[in-house]
């Protein structure tokens, strides 16, 4: 049977990255790690959806500027978001005229985009490949739940959709962060149907993909500084650790969840934590990648998670299928 984990031959690098956030993200513990903060949720436009497109546009431009690149230097851009038809991305990057492949992995989109960009560069399909994603609290609430002026009560297990974007470029380089391997996830559905409990729906998918990586490679949690998940929040993080403990594997000591890191649980009303494509995307691009580049962190597994749900289908009684894709990012190139 073919292994889901693919080692890179050339260990391409993330040569630049950028993270853009909003007011809530600025007020959280990682506020200083964003390249730009926008206090205006409309991003100087007249709708939240147009604002999200501006969010992605800013992330792409900041990432390119930091590396001295122009849009025409990018061979392919992988991008997606939470909105129907990924309009946050398509309208945000349309003016750049980059070769574009739209993707949808819900909150796992940054891991999927990074995985694809890395494999395209490693297999010499592209010289420079870019990945971008975003989410916006107001656009997500309008699409998946209720208009903001409805004033609905959020349950204790609900999570706060980040107004944030992350963008990065992968290319051959002799400087870290290096992409050492990628694991393509499988759809996992454990029957959770509560759209306000994304953590419980996504945790089994993260467990499946991370376990597959360990099985395929023979590596262990202790080989990594951090095992980073995307947006499981309090509920999903607890479930993930418990699932591993059933296999006599301890990941509590080095597990980090982007949804647990982005906001202050004591000072901000975010219930079970952060979520949205921009949560994992911005934490990876703004926090983890610079620390790996600086040598402060040696190895991480980045396993963002996504709930592949539709409000319409969920209201018809369907459960929530989820997925997680994983990327091994390292400060050392290795010889695999």
Image (spheres, rainbow, N blue to C red):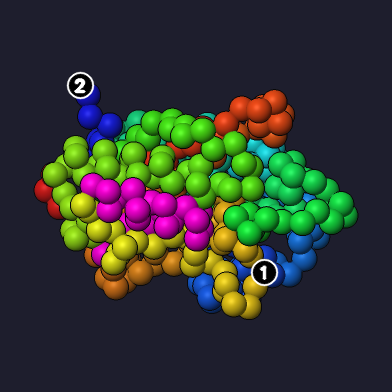
Residue 134: image x %, image y %? 60, 50
Report if residue 120 lies within the magenta region: no
* In front of the other: 190 or 47: 190
Image quarter of residue 255: bottom left
Q: Nearer the viewer, mark 2 or mark 1?
A: 1
Q: Dividing the image into 4 quarters, which one contains the C terminus? A: top left
Q: Residues within 10 Å of mark 1 (few under 14, many from 20)?
A: few
The structure residue drawn at horizontal position 59% and vertical position 77%, both measured from the top left corner, is 266
Q: Which residue has dot 2 on it? A: 1
- Any part of residue 56 in sight: no
Q: Residues within 10 Å of mark 2 (few under 14, many from 20)?
A: few
- Magenta residue span: 225-247
The structure residue drawn at horizontal position 23% and vertical position 29%, both measured from the top left corner, is 3
Image quarter of residue 263: bottom right
Q: Dividing the image into 4 quarters, which one contains the N terminus? A: top left
Left/right placement of residue 140 relative to residue 101 reads right
* In front of the other: 182 or 189: 189
Left/right placement of residue 68 relative to residue 223 reads right
Q: CA distance from mark 2 to mark 1?
A: 46 Å
Residue 102: image x %, image y %? 56, 33
Of the residues under marks 2 and 1, which one precedes in the sequence? 2
> Up-down: is 10 above or below 62?
above
Q: Which mark is residue 6?
A: none
Residue 289: image x %, image y %? 38, 62
- Any part of residue 235 in sight: yes
Mark 1 element type: loop
Image quarter of residue 120: top left
Left/right placement of residue 23 relative to residue 132 reads right
Report if residue 236 lies within the magenta region: yes
Q: Which residue has dot 1 on it? A: 269
Mark 2 element type: loop
The structure residue drawn at horizontal position 35% and vertical position 53%, both measured from the top left corner, is 242
């Amino acid at each position: 049977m073919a292994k889901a984990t693919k080692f890179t031959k050339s260990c391409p690098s993330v040569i630049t990255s950028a993270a853009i956030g909003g007011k809530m993200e600025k007020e959280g513990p990682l506020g200083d790690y964003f390249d730009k903060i926008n206090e205006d949720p409309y991003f100087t436009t007249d709708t939240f959806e147009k604002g999200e497109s501006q969010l992605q546009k800013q992330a792409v431009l900041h990432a390119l500027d930091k590396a001295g690149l122009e849009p025409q230097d990018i061979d392919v851009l992988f991008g997606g978001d939470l909105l129907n038809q990924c309009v946050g991305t398509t309208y945000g990057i349309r003016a750049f005229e980059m070769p574009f492949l739209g993707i949808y992995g819900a909150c796992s989109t940054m891991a999927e985009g990074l995985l694809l960009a890395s494999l395209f560069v490693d297999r010499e399909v592209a010289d420079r490949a870019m990945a971008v994603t975003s989410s916006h609290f107001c656009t997500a609430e309008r699409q998946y739940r209720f208009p903001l002026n409805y004033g609905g009560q959020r349950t204790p297990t609900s999570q706060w959709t980040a107004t944030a974007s992350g963008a990065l470029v992968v290319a051959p380089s002799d400087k870290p962060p290096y992409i050492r391997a990628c694991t393509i996830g499988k759809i996992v559905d454990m029957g959770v149907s509560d759209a306000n409990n994304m953590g419980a729906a996504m945790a089994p998918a993260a467990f499946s993909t991370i376990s597959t990586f360990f099985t395929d490679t023979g590596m262990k949690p202790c080989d990594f500084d951090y095992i980073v998940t995307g947006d499981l929040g309090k509920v999903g993080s607890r479930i993930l650790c418990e699932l591993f403990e059933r296999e006599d594997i301890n990941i509590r000591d080095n597990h980090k969840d982007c949804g647990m890191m982005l906001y202050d649980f004591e000072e901000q009303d975010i219930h079970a934590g952060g979520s949205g494509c921009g949560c994992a995307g911005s934490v990876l691009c703004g926090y983890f990648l610079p620390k790996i580049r600086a040598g402060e962190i040696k190895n991480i597994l980045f396993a963002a998670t996504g709930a592949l749900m539709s409000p319409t289908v969920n209201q018809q009684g369907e459960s929530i299928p989820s997925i997680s894709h994983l990327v091994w990012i390292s400060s050392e190139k290795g010889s695999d």
